[in-house]
Amino acid sequence: MADLAVKGRSRQKAAPSPWKQKKRKPSKPGSGVASLNGKWAYVFIAPFIAMFLIFGLFPVVFSTQLAFYKYDPLSLEQTWSWVGLDNFKDILADETFWISLGNTFEIWALSTFPQMIMAIGFAAILRSRFLRGKTFWRTILLVPNITSVIAVAIIFGQLFGRDFGMINTAIGFFGLEHIDFIENSFASHVAVATMITWRWVGYNSLIFLASMLAIPDELYESASLDGAGAWKQFTNVTLPGLKNTITFVLIVGTIGGLQVYAEPLTLAGDNGGGSSHQLSTLTMYLYNESFINARYGYGATIGILITIIVLIISLINFVVTRRVASEDK
Amino acid sequence: MTSATVTRRRKPKWQRVSLFGYITLTLVALVSVFPFYWMFVVASQTSDAISSPTPVLIPGGRFFTVIQHVYEVVPFNTALLNTTIVGLTVAVAQVFFSALAGFAFAKLNFRGSKFLILFVIGTMMLPSQLGIIKLFMMVSEAGWLDTLLALIVPALVTAFGVFWMRQVVDAQVPNELLEAASIDGAGVLKIYWSIVLPIIRQSGFVLGLFSFLASWNDFLWPVLVLQSPGSWTVQAALPQLKAAYVIDYSLNLGGAFMATAPLLLLFVFVGKRLVSGVMDGAVKG
């Protein structure tokens, strides 16, 4: 726990990580102080709850309702008409929806799994107590994450350019044919996944690093005494210790992955996602249908489906992690 | 050979950093920084130089011309000002409201406290697109389109902020301290102001930084609700540089450079804090 947090000058030593309270305190987290007048709580939470209901919850509930309606911008009186499940039926027969879904998943898979392997690898290197320039490496890993998505997309769009992009120049240098990173569907997904990976791999390395530092040194020492080599120690001590963090990163990555929007939009240059919708993602399609074609009900339906997918993947994640955890015991 | 044995004892095998480790980190660092350098290179070159078969790797002399051109195409100073106003307002508001609610959820006993916080945390799982259509209609009915209010008001509170501050108060403020103060006759408001706030100041600052960055980099929502150039944020202005028939790469990357430079400057001062913020927030397994 010695260097759990990078030492800032003014950081209080006494302040533990907000996530570790269970081990440190006998009192249950969230259990209040009895001698304080609890009525004040309503005053304290009132502004948050009020704004949360209006701008957080209300739009979610009513967007869900919109999915059962059809909006007609041309009619004069009745602009909204109840259509039941028609939007859902339409969407299942909508080719562009399925293309967008497939694109989203391909981009998600291409950006999630290689990134996770890299992040765990980088974290394993950063973990060493004898690494020189710890703060420097950690800080520089976070630099890509603070840049705006749109700036990243513009830069990588240039690097991935078909004729004069640096990546294709390098490919040409090896005598290979240039790849069209916009028109070629798979290549365009690789380009988008590269942008996402570049932006997030350092961030996730730090998450994994924090998790690795919480694994007690004794576990490694005893494994080392048992004759386990570096790789054995990694698979038998480090990886099991990261299980919860892997779930966490996967779920956050899935929520983020299904929201991918700015990168493919910038690369494709239009809301439709390129000439054959090869860069259309679910969020782009939602945006396109709702705000460009004014099909609000249809857009809301896409929003619901995105939510259902997030919930299903999170559920699968929990079940798998729990099963793996119980097998270990 | 004694010195070797001593070194070995001090650095157990699993803790040594190999040369491979340093090479990997150096490569990662280069790849992390290269796009920023490249942004500057392209922004300072002529279009001819960029599209020549042998790529240029060093900056040219056109940087200020290109930046001037950026300013001719989009009102960039206004965009910077707008983005800063929104970012600061949102950051301050989120820290203020989250700290209040986070303290209440962590330390005060009241009916419905458990249910409310679980409910709030549960909504963090919902993707933001679910509510975006109705939110757009609300903002448009309120007459906030093309004003910064459209960005500020919906972002004043977040479930994440409250969740974060609740964890922070829980972990950093001992119950005994609050009990002692209340026995001495201090009221809840006084306790919050003079005991809780000073303790959680640092973590509140980190939350504010994250809110500021998220607000600065938000793209989908600003593009949706801001159509007139005077109301653009930096992210809403950037795509306008691409609008031309032939893509002018130096113009685009010049804009990207201008949009990123303030953040890089900020990062120089707060990078370390952000690193510890990210690591503190990680789930420990």
Image: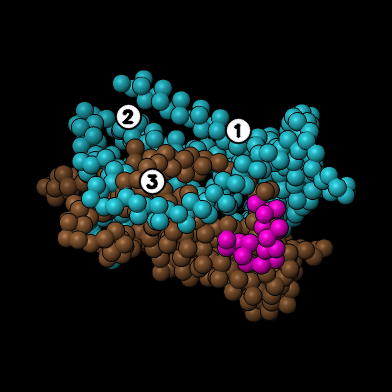
Chain colours: A cyan, B brown
Residue under label 2:
A236
Depth check, front residue: A43 or A301: A43
At which x and y percent is residue A327? 36, 20
Quarter where residue A176 is shown:
top right
Q: Is residue B39 left or right of residue B159?
A: right
Q: Is residue B77 above or below residue B152?
A: below
Q: Is residue B233 magenta?
A: no
- Residue A308, which numbered label? 1
Q: Which residue range is magenta in the image?
A: B135-153
Q: Which is closer to the viewer, label 3 or label 2?
A: 3
Marks 3 & 1 on one chain: no
Depth check, front residue: A221 or B205: B205
Secondary element at image label 1: helix
Q: Is residue B204 above or below residue B254?
A: above
Measure the C-alpha gap from mark 3 to mark 1.
25 Å
Question: To which chain does the residue with label 1 belong?
Answer: A
| Majority SS type along the magenta span | helix
At label 1, the amino acid type is Ile
At which x and y percent is residue A95? 79, 33
